[in-house]
Structure formats: C-alpha cells, structure tokens
Amino acid sequence: MKKKSFLELTPAVLFTVGAYIFPLTMLFVYTYKIGGNISIFNDLNFQIFKFTTYQAILSTMLAVAMGLPGAYLIGRTRFKFKGIFAALSTVPFVMPSISMTLGFISFFGHNGLLNAYFLWPIFHVRFEPLFTLLGVVMGNAFYNFPLTMVIVGGAISTLDPVYAEAAKIDGASRLKSFIFVELPILLPSIIASALLIFIYCFTSFAVMLVIGGAQFSTLEVQIYMYLTTLLDFKGAIGLTLIQIFFIGLIASLFSILRRSTGTFSQEISRVNSKFPSWGFFYILGIFIFVFGPIISQVFSGFWNFQNSTFTLEWFERLFSGRMDPYIGNSIFLSIFWTLVFSTLSAVLTIILSITAAHAVTKIKAPIFDALFTSALAVSPVTLAFGYLVIQNYIPLSFPLEIIPIYTMLSFPIGFQTLLSGWQRFPSEIDEAASVDGANWIQKTFMIRIPILKPQIISTFFFSFAISMGEMGATLVLYDPRFPMISASAYKLFSSMHVPEAQAFGALLTIATFLIFYALERPILTDNRSF
Amino acid sequence: MKKIFLLFSLMALIITVGFSIDTLTIYTYSSFISGIGNEIKPIFEKMYDCKINFVSMESGNIVARLILEKDNPKADVVIGLSQSQIPKVLNQDLLLPYKPTDIASVVNKSFLIDPEYRVIPFDYGALAIDYNLKTVPNPPKTFEALLNPEYAHTLVIEDPRTSTTGLDFLLWTIGIYGNDWQNYWKKLVPTIKTVTSGWDSAFQMLESGEAKMMVSFATDEAYNYYYYNGSDVGVVIPNGKAYVMVEYAGIVRGTRHLELAKDFMNFMLSKDFQSAIPLNQWMYPVTNVPLPKVFIDHAPSITETVTVPLDQISKSLSSWISQWTEIIVK
C-alpha cells in the first residue's frame, strides 16, 4: 500500500521539482555570476514583513467572515439564484487587475456610482475606502472570500445530517446545533480556506497596489523591485526564500493541525433547508460590495462616457482588427490561446492534485503538504525569471514555460481541495470494488472520479480562472505568437486604448461568468446518491 | 483527447518553424512596437531586405532579461533604456560599442553619456505634473507650492520600485533638492493621494476624476489636442526646471547579425525615423527635424533642465529607493 502511495506521489513531486524548485535554483545559482550586494535582513524589509502579515491577518478575518454565511447558503439551502450567485463570486479571480482598478474607482470612488448616485444624494455622506487600509482589507476580501464560500460550502453540502438531527433530538436549537455540533466538524475545511486566504493575502500584489496603492507595500513589491529596478537578483531570491519558508511553515502547521482534528468519512447525503431570512441581507450586502465593482466594470465596456449613451462602438473597434497591432497579434487568437493554455493547465492541475492528495492522505507526511503548498509563496515574476535562465541551456518556448507556471500557481489550491475530498472519501466503497475484482483503472474512472466530481470541478475552474487572469509571468515571457487575453488587455490599457480595453475586460468578465455558471450547475443540482 | 493531441502537434509545429530570412530581433517596450515600430518596420525591412522581430516586455524588465540571457543572447538590438538603467547595462557589459555615422546630428551633446558609444540616444521627453483643468484652477508652479495645503490629497505618483516614471520623478526631486530631498518628500506626503504601481493606473485616476493631479509627461496636453481637438488636462513643469528622460538604444553583445544591427543604429538617427518620433512616441527627436504644429502650440518648450550624474545614480540608487520607501510606506 505504502509503495503504491509513493508511486502516486511521483508525478506531483517530479513536477514540483522540475517546474518550481529547479527554475528557482537555477536563478539562484546564476545570480552568483552577476555579483552585487545582498541585504535581506534590514529594518525596511522587517517593517514591510510586519505590515504584510498584519494586513494579511485582517484580510483573512474579513474574507472568512464574509464567506461563511455564503458557504452555508450554498451548501445547505435552496434558493433561486444560487447558480448565478456562485458564478458571480468567482469572477473577481479572473478580472485583470487594471480593469478591477476601474471597477473599484467607478463604484467606490469619489464620483463613483455608490457615492454620486446613492450615499451623497440621500445621506449626504461619502464612503471612500480606496487608498486606505480599509480599502486594502476590503480588496483582499473581495478577491478571496469565494475560497471560503466554495471550500466550506462543499464541506457543508456533504455534511451528514445525522449530527444535526441528534442535536435536535437532544433539544438544541438550530443555531446551537450549528455552532456546537456542525461547526467543529467543519473546522478543518474552514481552517483550510483561511490558510489559503492568508497565503494569498500575504503574497497579494495587484490587489494591494490597485486598491490600496503602493504605500501599502507587501514583500511581493520589494521582490519585484529587486528583480526589475535594482536588478539585485540575490535580494529577490533571498526574500523569496524567506517567503517560501514562512508559507511552508504555515502549511505544515496547518497540516499537523488538520491531522489532530481527524478526518470524517461519511456517506454523502443531501439536505436542503429553508432559505433563512438573514440570507436576503447577506446577499444584498455581497451584491453591493462585490458585484457593484464587477457590474460597473462590465457596464463601462458598453458605455460612452462622453455622451452618456449606450454603445457597442468599443466592441466593434476591438474586433475590427484595428487593435491588433497594439496586442501584437489577432484578438481572436488571444482568446483561442487563452482557452487552450488555461484548459491544459487546469487538466494538468487536476491530474497532479488527485494523485498527490490521495497519496498524502495515505502517507501522512506533513513535509509533502508543506512542499506542495509553499509554491503559493513564489511570485510568478520570479518564477518566470527562473525560466529565462533555463532558456540559456534548454531551448524552451512560451507554451512549455507558461503551462507549467500556470499549473504551479493553481496546483496548491487543487491539492488542498482534493485533499479534503479524499478525506471524506468513503473508502469502504473503494474496498468493496477491489473485493469485487475492479482494477485500478475501473476504480478510478467508475468510482473515484464520479465521487470526487465536485472537488474536480471546483479545482478545474479555480485553475482555469487563475491561468486566465495571470499577468506577471505572462508579461515577462510574452510571445506575440501566443497572445493571451490578460496581457492583451494590459497592452491596450498601456497604449491608451482604454475604452477598448474596458470592452475586452467586460467580455472576459461575462465569459467567465457564463463558463462558471455552466460549470457550477452540476455541483449544485447533482443529487448525489449511491 | 484527440483534439488536445492535435493542438499539441499544431503548437509543436508553430514552435519548430524557424525564420529563414535574416531576422533582426529587437527587445523593446510594447508601445514602441505598436506606435513608431509599426511605422518604421516596413521601411527598414525594405531598405535592407530583412525581417524585424520586435519582442515586447515591460520597460523595467528589459535589462533584467538581457542579464539573464547574457550567456545565450536572443536579442540583436535593445531599444528604450533609460538613464537610470544605463549604469547597470554598462557595468554588466551587455552592449557592443558602435558609433553611428550621423552621430554628429544629435543636437544636445550632453545626451552622449558613453564615450565608447555603447548606448545611443534616439529621443527624449520631460516629466511634468498633469492637472485637471476644471478642478485645479491654480496649478502649482513650483515644487514648494505643491506642499501647499490646498493641494492636500490630490497628487498621484508612481512607485519608483515598480515604475520608471516613478523612479524618474524621484530623481527629479533629487536633482532639484540635492541631499535635502528626504525633507522635501516628508513634507510632500500630505499632498500625495496614492502611489500607483505604474503610469497607466495613475492616468486612469486622472481621467476618471478620482485624482486631480498626477506625475506624467510634458506632451500629454499636445496628445489630447492631437486626438481629441482639446484637452481637459493641463501640464506644468514646476520651477520651470525639467527632468529630461533620454531614451537609449544599443547593440547587444553576442548578436548574430552585427552588420544589420549597425545599419539599424544608423537608421535610428535618420530623418525617416526621427520625424516619426513626435506623433508616435510623444517625445522629442534628438536630431534637428522639424516639430509638428501641435508640439509647438501645446507642449511646453524645454529650456532649463536638471540632471543627476550617472555615477551618483549607480552608487546611490538602491539606498535612495530604500529611503524613499521608509518615508512613504506605511
């Protein structure tokens, strides 16, 4: 059994070493030839480290608090627009940071929708969170609360109702039974989501800069500076190592914690409670807070601000081919390649996550947990620079670099998601199948994949979304023969074709919404019974 | 599954098909390619019967990429190096010396900073403060005036750690205030609305009315007049002392197309190339070609300039940025 588990671990270990450890090591080795001073443990870096941690803790608390009610609504209750609600919440993941800036400014800004048309005319107050610590925390929560919603929501939907029923029989109220009986059972998944959110907030780059401004600096900004402005690669690698170590530490702590809380294998059954009255307020709040900026971003793709009229002009221009010189290739190709690369890396992520997570549930070695999760601590730009060094020795092309990078960025999430899936996996079914003479392939395709379908689907769309929205590494390695949507939108913005870029952003948002709406449906409507 | 295989083989095909004709690979930033690059590419390709392959990257990444590819360079020519990047480029010995035939046509000799001619200037511009004409009736005329409480929380600047515009603005204040620049910045903090990571987000904030002023370029007003026949943005150069940003190009050491690269360096100082600069780059040409009318009418003429000596930049840049960070970062 053990031997087989190690075999299952091989793809993920090989991939992690090849696509993440190797490029970083090469970058590290290479920088010794260049020379230069190195200063990592200075007061400034310490100050930034402190602030990075501080804002990450605040942001995580807000994101988890925002996500939990949503998780309950999605996992437990039945309501009409559940699919739409769930799909919309994943949109922030793919919004290019620059169109998010515009979304936030046009919604929360001084002259934004919220202030100019609502708060100021009615209450004569303005709410201007942009460029404050509150804005930073809000922005991180905006991006990350869906993680709690989806991870914990998935756990709630598969929670055995027996616990709640037992509590009810013993006379507990619904709230009491939720807090004292079900919440402790859900704790591992809540901690899992909080951990991921903390890591994302800790390494937040675009969100921080866009909503808070660079005066709220994270270590990522310092790393970026070492790499590009000061060309102090040693400094960058040094800080990256500190970050990897720190994130790895958190990941292994978490892993130990999770083992001590135990795993819950149970049969999956379906509960649909009544939609609670607080749910309306919650959805209204989320609607304003999260969907406001998204909708105003989409809106601006169809709006002529000079004449205040609805227009399709920006879309026409975008697809007329006149924007192609700015992108460096055809706009249609950029959509095509984005779909290809995002799909390929999502599929790769799923394969690696299923095998690695299965092996780790069997082997119980926190070191692998830490290794797989620590990849979240590497900035995509640093990783891309590592690939540039490798190019000196091995001829690589854009697809061979960007697919591993995208996969590496989403693998930790896929791994965590599948890990919680395997922990709840009814192993007796697997064993029964073995007794009946099913081989590995039969078990995998007939039993394991169908049971893990919810986790596989959510891994697919998170991975897809991360690839579609990634900009840092994409811009470093950019090859106009393989244009990508995110980089193209960026190029339109920076060549002052803002309305066209907005239209492109709107298209991306709408497409994401539709794809995820379609993908979400099976999770939410599936009547899992076996 | 079959489709994925097909896709893979298609990709492999695209990757393996090389270029047969002589190709000059040029590293530059993306707006260069979409603007002036588009215009001059066919001219040069026809003149020398070759192909130009522009590779775009963020301007901050260009030098990093040259360093990382030093053992196996892929570029022949690099375009768009700024003054602050030059010391590193020369120290790392990334470029080959070459003196273009028309070098004497460069009007401002102070732009020729390398006696070995490894870096050649091809255009220049100046930083300025852009302000909203409606909401800022009295723009600040001096750096001191910027500290005035009436401008509190109005100015958007770019981060020198991530943006070359931000870095140039820091160097501008160092050029004006010398060793006392830290004091100036401490007093500037209340004026700053936010620090963006790049020029484009700051420009968005100005356009949308979120910010009243930003650090940008002297030709912005002319740009608006050219494209929109009017401008809601004015530009001012505080103290009348402009910080001039000169853009440089050079031949990459290890090029496999040395002769073609030399031809391109000569071409950059030609009339064809230099006349295409103003309306594409929104910068000023370095040779004596006539300026378009919109430049004469709506771009400030740059008379007095400030500079920071190269050796100082190479010695102190990283400590300046650290000090800046300590003043600005919360």
Image (cartoon, grey):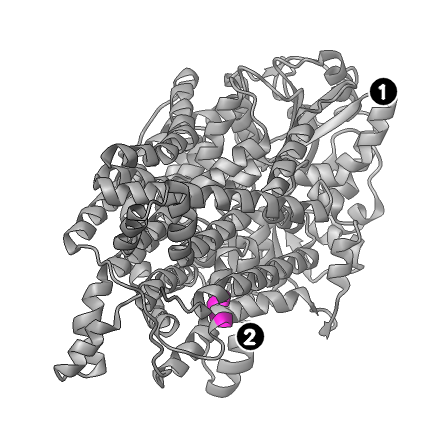
Q: Which residue lies under the disc numbered 1?
A: B49
Q: What stretch is highlighted in magenta?
A: A83-88
Image quadrant of residue A269?
A: bottom left
Farthest residue to the front: give it.
Answer: A436
Label drawn at residue A84: none
- The residue at which mark 2 appears reads as A113
State the residue at coordinates (69%, 30%): B14
What is the count of numbered marks? Answer: 2
Residue A273 as seen in the image, left or right of residue A506: left
Q: From what the image shows, is residue B238 above or below residue A399?
A: below
User: Regarding mark 1 in the picture, which secondary structure is present there?
Assistant: loop
Task: Please state the horizontal and vertical placement of residue B5, each as a whole percent of the image.
Answer: 61, 36
Within-10-Å neighbours for mark 1: few <14, some 14–19, many 20+: few
In terms of secondary structure, what is the magenta stretch mainly? helix
Q: Mark 1 lies on which chain?
A: B
User: Is residue A423 something that shows in the picture?
Assistant: no
What residue is drawn where x is 27% and y is 52%?
A: A427
Q: Which amino acid does label 2 sit on?
A: Leu
Instruction: Give the residue at x 44% y 38%.
Output: A224
Give the SS element for disc 2: helix
Q: Residues within 10 Å of mark 2 (few under 14, many from 20)?
A: some
Q: In this view, does B167 lie to the left or right of A306?
A: left
Q: Percent from the top left, x then y, of residue A70?
A: 37, 71
Residue A71, position as x, y percentages in the image: 35, 69
